[in-house]
Image (spheres, rainbow, N blue to C red):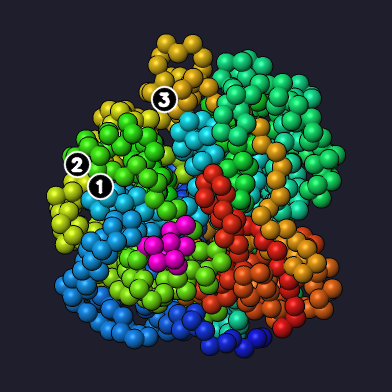
Amino acid sequence: MRAKPNTFRTALVAAALFSAAGLGAACAGSRGGSKAPASRASVAHPQVDASSQSCAGCHADATPQIAKEWEAGRHGLSLVRCYVCHGSTGADFRARPDTAGCRSCHSLQAMGGPGAVAGAEPRSDCFTCHAPHALSAKGKTNPHAGLR
Amino acid sequence: MAISRRDFLKTAAAASALSALGLPGPVAAADGATKWVKSVCRYCGTGCGLYVGVRDDKVVAVQGDPENHNAGFLCVKGMLLPQIMQAPGRLLHPLVRQGDGFRQASWEEAMGLVAARFGDTIAKYGPDAVGFYGSGQGLTEETYAANKLFKAGIRTNNVDGNPRLCMAGATAGYVSTFGKDEPMGCYEDIDHADVFFIIGSNTAEAHPILFRRIARRKETGRNVKVIVIDPRRTATARIADLHIAFTPGTDLAILNAMAGVLFAEGLVDEAFLRDHVTFGEGAEPSRSRTDYERLLADYTPAKAAAMAGCRAEDIVQAARWFGEKGRTAISMWCMGLNQRARGVWANNLVHNLHLVTGKIGVPGSTPLSLTGQPNACGGVRDGGALSHLLPFGRVVANEKHRGEMEKLWSVPAGTLSPKNGFATIDLFRAVEEGKVKSLWVMCTNPGQSLPNVDRYRKAMRREGAFVVVTEAFHPTRTSELADVVLPAALWAEKEGVYGCTERRYQLLEKSVPPQGEARPDFDILCDLARRLGHGKLLPWKSPEEAWAEILAVAKGTPYDFSGMTRDRLREAHGLLWPLPVEGHPGTKRRYVKGEDPLVPAAHPQRMKFYGRPDGKAVVWLRPQKPPEEVTDAAYPLYLTTGRVLEHWHTATMTSRCKELAHTNLETVAELHPQDAARLGVKDGDTVRIASRRGAEKFAVKVTDASRVGLVFLHMHDPDRMCNHLTIDAVDPISRQPEFKICAVKVERA
């Protein structure tokens, strides 16, 4: 890993990390093996200089199957990269993201579709049908039919 | 229990996005105390609609607007917008230079100083000794206010801005071919396209939400073909059926060769050519079809391929797919064509493909220029805030247009200067030469974004130059050079209109109060006007009042959106002009009879290019021309610059988001493995890259997505600026610089 020179930007990055540390303590998840995402256990990701290497670059070696599934899926195609769901490698790292992350892009789907009633709890079962990383759906019926 | 779609959307928005953004638990909970305010993304020219979630006067979340063109989707930059609002580095009070640093000042002191210096400059050296440099990031009302103050009040046309670096080639391309600026098609055309012709655009990274729509069409449409023409095998090329990589600067030959194939293989639309097209060369539409075909005969696929370093059969294939009868074709391009010394010609040649095949003005067929900044179209191009323009299709050089604006602005006849102002590079050269002594920079970052930037950074710090910068953050690579830095309200802290790529105008409602002592640029400009004695020209108490005037100025022009009242904008999720009367639904496809209200119902043909005197578009004869600087023994590699998905413009905002600060912010030098081997460098090594203008060190990334003989650098990194190296040669028509191509040498550092 390269040492970073002291630069104009370093101050900005340091400031951003500082604010992240203040916000993100509750967001880490576990690497547990269960299928349903466990929430908010504490597993840290090693700090890496991600400016010149991508998550997927390392994970092509570290977790090749997962990297391949992601790349071949819609998120890989659209460059929804690892950190979008998993956070940065700082204190906000989430080993197993919960479905809150889905909702910021897939709001309608994550709320259960147009039949949802006001005040309904958001879905927490996205990963029941959508395998993490590949994200292709299992099953023949589409509960989101009718949505754009 | 049945609820309306609108209620559902509101509930969904209120209950969802917070915890997605890495915010702390208590805020993340769904709650009824969050207010959701309709707005638009701050970043690129796609113009994604979103809701801003507000709690306790703070932006705590955003949520894509499902009823807007983006169907609820946001890219990662948009998703993380809440972080920029509270980010460290917000400028909260005015600063005045003191030696090599700054000291805090009151608004009264800072504005007093600015008004005195501008007033003094104008009194001593005349109005053309001051200038305004704005951007496509300003709101329409802000840019309109600046344009009016400088052109009608101060009486100089030295009003230019970042769109000159970004979209001037596209503007001049549309104007020369169709008579008026701005695309005639819309995003919905993506859903109907059978062939995507993407040239000089890494859509997947620069316009991710449009790329998603393209990928979805590719997935669901029947036999949809995607052609990507780019020297690099970009992320966009991943969905390509055909990727043509080529030597930078040779794409004019490829485009002419494609047109030649269309004629040779009978893929042209004879009726369309007869009814809608004329031919021209230089600046005059005085050529014939025979002249054009003679020019094309000189660009056989074999000859073009030899020039471009690509395969002739790929050029033929691209032309066949584009021209196949009964199928639609959409072209999309961005800086790869615009940021070129022959960018206007390149734009013309893309338009030619549509005109000779008649693939234009029907769903799925259109030449759609993609825009870099969120309001380059609405505020600057449409609003006429460039040095040769006046609002809504009018130009400085046209006496009638000046007369119209003098009436609309209630200033005496002869007030508006008939002389074009300085375009961007000329403006900063005028600062260098001391011709422009006081410069106002609003909402952009030329100290990083100009080509050959060292030269112009020096100019801004020249003895006798007085530079005012209004900015939400400090320091930036421009604010650090300023004499006065004024704290500007940021995005959700103010109200105004953005107009994006597809002529879609949208209102950003104010969500939260400005932080610290920050003020909207609109207020700052009105304050400046009062202090310079031009308060009557900018009398508005709110952007809404200015909007009423803007509607009157647009009325009766080919841009007519005078039916777009503020109330309508508040209700709508974006409106496409022309929209000449209240109640009009807006226009998806311009120049098309039955869709565009400005085309008479009795017009005998299906389209009327009413921006041209004869109603016909021009197929321009444009030969291949090399870039301004070609490689040689001393500088043997081509440098090209571009963008990455995680950052935007000069990263003043995206670098302050924690996930994005971690990702791709550092500019690395992408080299082909053969070049890396020749230089004896590997991933992570440091190289020094030098051009005839400057040098910088970069870490190496070896990738076969690059092309042999080509180095790629992204433009975002404030520390390792690619613009130390880029060339400030400009297109003679658009005055846009050739950021995309220059010659460099690379050495192991």
Q: Position of residue A68 (x, y in %)?
A: 72, 63
Res A67 quadrant in image = bottom right
Q: Earlier in the sequence, mark 2 or mark 1?
A: 1
Q: Position of residue B183 (x, y in %)?
A: 49, 37
Q: Earlier in the sequence, mark 2 or mark 3?
A: 2
Q: Residue at x 39, y 50 (%)?
A: B421
Question: Are the residues tagged 2 and 1 within 8 Å (C-beta)?
Answer: yes
- Mark 2 → mark 3, Cα distance in angstroms: 33 Å
Q: Nearer the viewer, residue B165 or B77?
A: B165
Q: Is residue A66 above or below residue B268?
A: below
- Residue B596's tag is 3
Mark 2 surroundings: few (<14), some (14-19) or many (≥20) residues within 10 A: some
Q: Position of residue B740 (x, y in %)?
A: 63, 57
The amino acid on which the numbered mark 1 sits, given as a three-letter code, is Ala
* Chain under disc 2: B
> Comparing marks 2 and 3, which lies closer to the viewer?
2
For disc 1, the marked residue is B152
Q: Which residues are magenta?
A: B426-436
